[in-house]
Amino acid sequence: MLLSNGYSDVPPGKLASVVTCLEMLEKPLRRPERADGPWLLRRIVAPDPTWYRGIFRRVGLEWLWFSRLVMPQRELEAILLSADNEVYAVTVDGREEGLLELDYREAGQCELAFFGLTAAVRGQGAGRWLMNRAAERAWERPIDRFWVHTCTHDHPGALAFYLRSGFRAYARRVEVADDPRLSGLAPACAAAHIPIIAPTVERERHS
């Protein structure tokens, strides 16, 4: 549905973000990266959902990642156990500090489903290093398209980073969803840059 020009009200208790979809149609050249980085990439075969949701929270709650937290357990397990879905952890001295997920479940395509690092390793060159690894692995399979989407709740530099990495924007969407901080899926302190606007009853309860 096409939104009309001008402002549109978002109900209290909901989040709204502008989503940008990006793609690359051929394998990019590897971008220069830090040669002495301490990061390692470890594939997690058949990830346990509890482990997965733990690293998903650590990496993504700052940016209000919630899709895999509200997903039914059986649906999540089916994705994690699929041979066409690859999950990797970024480790530093044995600590898990990042998540990479490549989804090949649609023939001829790879979605960069999740890509993120904890605050402990951001700003050190790990992002570029991880994107180089992601592109290398994505194009190891016979795909015609590597794609990703990001939104205005994400890291403020995410969109520019994807463009620099060789992706091209092809679509823009608006996503409206329940605020996971109001349901307890995320702590109220998560994503402090995005204020909570609770429904009237909730606001009165906390006033």
Image (spheres, grey):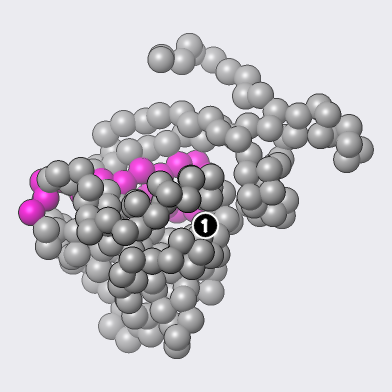
Q: Does residue 104 show up magenta in the picture? A: no
The relative height of residue 59 versus residue 23 in the rendered view (above or below) is below
Residue at image coords 57%, 55%: 61
Most foreground residue, 206 or 45:
45
The relative height of residue 79 versus residue 33 in the rendered view (above or below) is above
Amino acid carrying mark 1 in the image: Gly
x%, y% of residue 193? Answer: 65, 48
x%, y% of residue 159? Answer: 39, 47
Q: Residue furthest top?
A: 4
The relative height of residue 76 versus residue 13 in the rendered view (above or below) is below
Region in magenta: 142-162
**Of helix, strand and loop, which one carries label 1?**
helix
x%, y% of residue 71? Answer: 48, 45
Mark 1 = which residue?
Answer: 60
The relative height of residue 178 versus residue 136 in the rendered view (above or below) is above
- The answer to whether residue 159 is seen in the rendering is yes
Tell me where residue 1 sits by quadrant.
top left
Residue at image coords 33%, 66%: 46
Residue at image coords 37%, 30%: 172
- The answer to whether residue 123 is seen in the rendering is no
Most foreground residue, 151 or 49:
49
x%, y% of residue 104? Answer: 21, 51
Check disc 1: other Cα within 10 Å, few if <14, some if 14-19, many if 20+. many
- 1 left or right of 45? right
Residue at image coords 37%, 37%: 20
- 99 left or right of 171? right
Q: Does residue 150 show up magenta in the picture? A: yes
